[in-house]
Amino acid sequence: MPMVSINKVVPLFCIITACSACIPVSAPDGVIPIPVTEEPQIPVTQTPPISVTTVSQIPVTQAPRTCRELDNMASVFLNNDVTFEDMQFGRVPASDTCTTCDGGRLNYYNSTSSATPATTIKESMGGLTSATCPNMCMCEADGTCWMLSDNTIFGVDFWQYCSDGICGVYTVIIGDSDNEGIITLDGSRIITGNDQAGDFDNNFTPPPVSNRSAYIDVASIG
């Protein structure tokens, strides 16, 4: 039996700032002088210089796009091309979705009933296999991003859990290798299947998701 090893900056808002290209249409002194044509013996009054400000020189900031926080629900931002599979932990549908951000959606999930991931509790949001998503990228709220350490790993399940009003989405490593799992993009840290396997004294029961040395709390998946 494969070894099953078992909180965010997906902010709940997206802000897009746009600035049109700046087109120089005025002279260096900031004005456009209007040329004057003189005719013989006819006095001419020159038109005062006209100061011109173009709309293209004004930066435009759109209003923030916000996704509300929902009490006692775990939230995670999913790229448009992410589709979860049932990794034997279940695949429950999102309870709500916010689609105001570009490139994906923010899904909300009810908490599972256990802090310890288990295949007997079919309450997970689902997961991704290395076969269908070999380049999966999972980022924490502080901007730390993780990927598979090796594509021999079968995949990663995402276990949502809330306790005392604090919710998270936690990575469960699924594979046959004790020494492979997920690794930070800079290679500074790795979490393996063995880290989530539990020990003999605990009947090899996986540690709860509150164990931050064994799980990461995912904010976005792509």
Image (spheres, grey):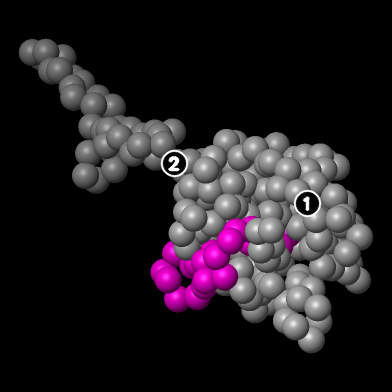
Residue 138 falls in image quadrant? bottom right
Which quadrant holds residue 201?
Answer: bottom right
* SS type, badge 1: loop
- Give coordinates of residue 186: x percent, y percent: 41, 69
Which residue is situated farthest in the front direction here?
1
Residue 46 vs 57, above or below: the answer is: above
Q: Nearer the viewer, residue 76 or 215?
A: 215
Indicate the secondary structure of the residue bearing disc 2.
loop
Q: Position of residue 164 (x, y in %)?
A: 91, 71
Q: Type of residue at label 2?
A: Cys
Residue on which disc 2 sits: 19
Q: Can you give x and y, in whole percent of width and height, for residue 157 in the image?
A: 68, 54
Q: Residue at x 78, y 43 (%)?
A: 91
Q: Residues within 10 Å of mark 1 (few under 14, many from 20)?
A: many
From the viewer's perspective, tell me whether residue 21 is left or right of residue 76.
left
Residue at 82% across / 43% down in the picture?
92
- Describe residue 92's horizontal placement relative to residue 65 as left or right: right
Residue that sits furthest to the bottom in the current view:
201
Look at the image and tell me whether residue 180 can be seen: yes
Image quarter (top left, top right, bottom left or bottom right) of the N terminus? bottom right
Which residue is identified by label 1? 89
Q: What stretch of residues is rendered in magenta?
A: 169-190
Query: How would you rate the neighbour count of disc 2 (Cα within 10 Å): few for under 14, some for 14-19, many for 20 or more?
Result: few
